[in-house]
Amino acid sequence: MRKCIFCGRTEAEFIDGNKWTEEHIIPESLGNETLKIYDVCKQCNSGLGTYVDKYFVDHMLVKIIRQNLGLKGQSGEVPNAFKEGRDKNGHLVRVDLDYKPHIVQYVEQSENKLKFVALTVEEAKKMAYKKLKRMNMTDEQIKNEFDKITNVKNAEYRPEIGYDITVEFNRFYMEALKIAYEYAIYKLGNVYLEDKTAKTIKEYLYRAIKGEMKKECSECPNVCMAPEFICKILSNVKGINCHMLFLHPDAENKLVVQVMLFLNPIFSFSVCISENATQYGIVKELPIEIVDIKYERKE
């Protein structure tokens, strides 16, 4: 009987409009339109998007590539990787798609002085009015304070903008684990679900899908960065826009999926999906999946 590969429920057990959905093994927002599976229920698919895929596809390092290739997200828009940063004083700065910075208005208070920073004098006055109103001043008192203002500056804004590119590796590993697990089922069939390692992976991912790791992602099992020799090969690959999945036994007869996203060493991982490769009869096949990236690069 058909079961969801994450929660294990059958269609007879679905409630509240739950149903089968189309699940992209590599997220669609990374340019994958072809590599899919269909044994995932709507509820689990939603959890995958929210708690597994989102951190990876919306990470700044990934968004830089998506922006360069024109890869749209769920909103239908190409991401702006540099949309928000902070200047050297820690103030929020927004950057448009033409890389033009815009200060986000703010108020600074020093002893009995207030400083309002905005894009225009009128916006600064509106901010000041709201601030003074909250201080229980009357309109007449506020007018008197405005009349005392002697220092209004217009300045060209050319900030040094800093961005946070901290990587929580367990969340990157979680995405690789999800891709490898789904790919194993895609290539090996539902018989893989009975594998001891598959059950461990399924349990971990299902906990993530339910939001149990949204505050702190626990150590991800069976995943590490791709081997050094693969990373060296990928470092020499230029101008090829695709992802690659490579299923093979290792020297210890474990079954491993090499997940190579964008053929980039930074986004390439090794995932052990079984302790016994021989039982699947693919030792001589060495299946390789090349997934073309459907992109809309701007000329």
Image (cartoon, helix red, strand yellow):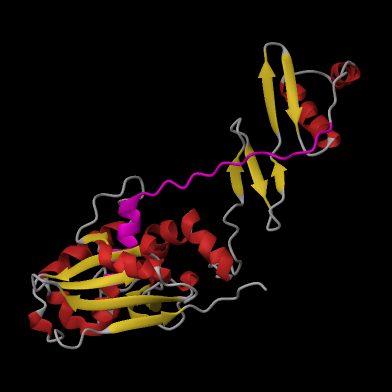
> Does 109 sit left or right of 217 as displayed?
right
Q: Residue furthest top?
A: 111
User: Which is nearer the eye, 289 or 187?
Assistant: 289
Q: Residue placed at 19% from the left, 61% from the top?
A: 222
Query: Is 231 situated above or below 194?
Result: above
Q: Is residue 155 magenta?
A: yes
Asked whether the viewer can see residue 115, the reply is yes
Q: State the extent of the magenta-drawn residues as a range.
A: 154-180
Where residue 176 appears, as percent x and y from the top left, is 31, 65
Q: In which quadrant will I find the N terminus?
A: bottom left
Q: Residue placed at 46% from the left, 81% from the top?
A: 33
Q: In which quadrant will I find the C terminus?
A: bottom right
Query: Is 257 situated above or below 133?
Result: below
Q: Is residue 177 magenta?
A: yes
> Does 223 sit left or right of 29 as displayed?
left
Where residue 164 appears, as percent x and y from the top left, is 49, 44
Quadrant location of residue 8?
Answer: bottom left
Quadrant location of residue 250?
Answer: bottom left
Q: Residue placed at 65% from the left, 72% from the top?
A: 298
Where residue 290 appears, as percent x and y from the top left, is 37, 82
Query: Is 154 situated above or below 196?
Result: above
Q: Residue placed at 85% from the left, 33% from the top?
A: 121
Report the number of discs: 0
